[in-house]
Image: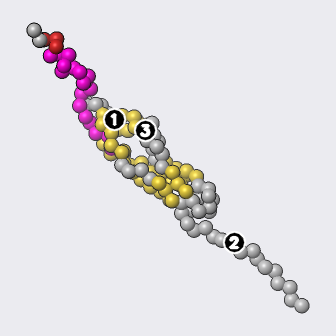
Amino acid sequence: MKIYESTPLFAVDRTAPVIACLDDITETTNLNSPGRTVTFVEPTATDNSGVVSLSSRSHAPGQFYLTGSTTVTYTFVDPSGNTASCSFNVVVIEGRFPCNSNYYVEQMERFSI
């Protein structure tokens, strides 16, 4: 009589996490300002295993972003080592001098007779 040992079969997960990435973000800063602090809700990910972790991010919400375009990249990993990345841009454009919106009205009242 032959006895066969069976090896348990395991499913191999080759499916990468699915990321809900952000669209590009554009913020305006005051004239002659080097940049500004930008906040945003971080991207999230799901996975068929039910477990996914943030592996890395190049920048975080609440950081100071220089005037211009900064590419922000997030990478997620599942327990099987499958990774997925997404990128979006944070664009900080130089605007105008800060001013009180009532400044013009206040000056007109001040000098009117």
What x and y, as percent, mark residue 23?
Answer: 38, 50
Q: Amino acid at mark 1?
A: Gly
What x and y, as percent, mark residue 52?
Answer: 59, 55
Is residue 55 on the magenta stretch?
no
Q: Which residue is mark 2?
A: 10
What x and y, as percent, mark residue 98?
Answer: 26, 26
How much space separates mark 2 and mark 1, taking CA atoms?
52 Å
Which residue corresponds to the image point at 46% horizontal and 43% vertical from the top-left? Answer: 41
The answer, for residue 38, to whether it is visible in the render is yes
Callout 2: few (<14), some (14-19), or many (20+) C-alpha neighbours within 10 Å?
few
Q: Which residues are magenta?
A: 91-108
Question: Marks 2 and 1: which is nearer the front?
Answer: 2
User: In the rendered view, does 34 fall on the left or right side of 7?
Assistant: left
Q: Which residue is mark 1?
A: 35
Which residue corresponds to the image point at 17% horizontal and 16% vertical from the top-left? Answer: 107
Q: Which residue is mark 3?
A: 39
Question: Marks 3 and 1: which is nearer the front?
Answer: 3
Q: Amino acid at mark 2?
A: Phe
How much space separates mark 3 and mark 2, taking CA atoms?
43 Å
The answer, for residue 67, to whether it is visible in the render is no
**Residue 43 higher or lower than 101, as above or below:** below
